[in-house]
Image (spheres, helix red, strand yellow):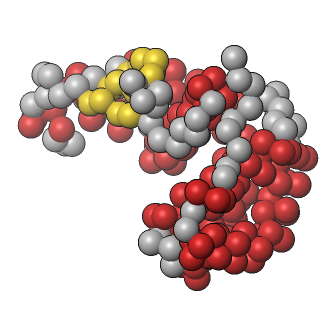
Amino acid sequence: MITSSPLFDINQLTTEEQEKFTIVHNELQPNYTSYLQYKLNLELDTKFEKEEEENEWNYELHRFLRARKWNVPHTIKCLVEMIKWRMDNHVDLILEHKPTSDRMNLLQKIVPFVDHGYTKTDRPLYIEKSGLFNVDRLLNSFQPGELIQCHIYWLELHCRLARERSRQTGKHIESFALLHDLNGCKVEMRKVE
């Protein structure tokens, strides 16, 4: 079994893409160094390797560049905002935050869902029985901020699962699959009164 994620290979990019990647990488180095130091100082139960984090950062830069159609200024702006948001909202602590974990357990009772292994392409698979939950019960049980925290928790968990799968398979996995079962879904169940 492979114990580390596959290394990012800049040579798989075109010459123009490599140049843009390098510009973004160099421009954001101080921000990233500060963020990495912030993460190293967190008291996390799950420790991480600096080298692996740097490799994941390269994949993150590549993903952001692709999503912004290789627009360098826009990519830099978005990544700076993302780093600030993660630090300001303590996102890197959320998976170990007991109150949020407890809220996720309650959420699962209201909105039946399960992590169901992996797809054929090794993406983590999430299945939600969206047709079986009551919106009123959900909104009576959670404040808006708690729902946001649960959503962030869920995203971080699936990013972690994708990263773990990358280690297991030796190929980079950066997404996950969602399946929403709408069986039993009625218009009136979605109505908030």
Q: Specify the quadrant that holds the C terminus.
A: top left
Q: Residue at x 35, y 33 (%)?
A: 178
Residue 157 is at least partly visible in this image = no
59 lies left or right of 131: right
Residue 126 is at least partly visible in this image = yes
In the image, is residue 126 above or below residue 117? below
In the image, is residue 184 above or below residue 160? above
111 lies left or right of 4: left
As rendered, which of 94 and 54 lies closer to the eye? 54
In the image, is residue 190 above or below residue 54? above
- Which residue reaches farthest bottom? 73
For the image, the number of numbered tags is 0
**Based on the displayed image, in which of its 4 quarters is residue 48 positioned?**
top right
User: Residue 152, image x and y in percent?
Assistant: 54, 43
As rendered, which of 181 and 139 lies closer to the eye? 181
Q: Residue at x 9, y 31 (%)?
A: 186
Q: Residue at x 47, y 41 (%)?
A: 175
- Which residue reaches farthest left? 187
As rendered, which of 56 and 171 lies closer to the eye? 171
Q: Residue at x 42, y 17 (%)?
A: 116
User: Residue 192, image x and y in percent?
Assistant: 21, 42
Q: Specify the quadrant that holds the N terminus.
A: top right
User: Residue 181, image x and y in percent?
Assistant: 22, 25
